[in-house]
Amino acid sequence: MMSDQVRRAKASTLFIRPLPVQSNEDHRAVYQAILAGDPATARRIHRAYRQQAREILTTLLEKHRLRSL
């Protein structure tokens, strides 16, 4: 159920979210950490990315009063 809500929230905010420049950089850094055999760094970067993405998404949902997803 929660994954469906997240999917709907992401779809609803697709055109009002910032361009994914930072997201692309974060994903690249996770990939590089995995290639380097450094799972702790990959995990840390990915966790920070997910927290930032959650903040962006919830801020947009609140700002635009998108409560019933």
Image (cartoon, rainbow, N blue to C red):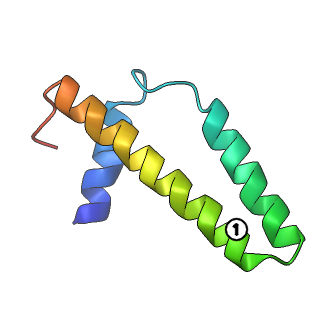
- Residue 15 found in image quarter: top left
- Looking at the rendered structure, the secondary structure element under dot 1 is helix
Task: Please tell me which residue is depicted at 69% across the width and 77% down the height of the picture.
Answer: 40
Left or right: where does residue 1 sit relative to residue 13? left
Position of the N terminus, as image quadrant, is bottom left
**Is the C terminus in the top left, top right, bottom left or bottom right quadrant?**
top left
Foreground of the two, 35 or 7? 35
Q: Position of residue 55 (x, y in %)?
A: 36, 43
Image check: 30 left or right of 17? right
* Residue at (71, 69) in percent of width and height: 41
Q: Please state the horizontal and vertical placement of residue 34, each as a whole percent of the image.
A: 80, 71
- Name the residue rendered at 18%, 32% in the picture: 62
**Residue pictured at 16% horizontal, 32% vertical:** 66
Mark 1 residue crowding within 10 angstroms, few (<14) / some (14–19) / many (20+): many
Place of residue 28 in the rendered image (x, y in percent of width and height, measured from the top left): 77, 50
Quadrant assignment, res 25: top right
Along the line of sight, which residue is nearer the eye, 26 or 1? 26
Find the residue positioned furthest to the left: 68
Read off the residue under disc 1: 42
Q: How many circles with numbers are drawn on the protein?
A: 1
In the rendered structure, the answer to whether residue 5 lies left or right of residue 53 reads: left
Q: Is residue 49 above or below residue 33?
A: above
> Is 57 placed above or below 7 here?
above
State left or right for residue 18 relative to residue 39. Answer: left
Q: Where's residue 22, x and y in %?
A: 63, 36
Amino acid carrying mark 1 in the image = Ala
User: Quick check: 48 above or below 66?
Assistant: below
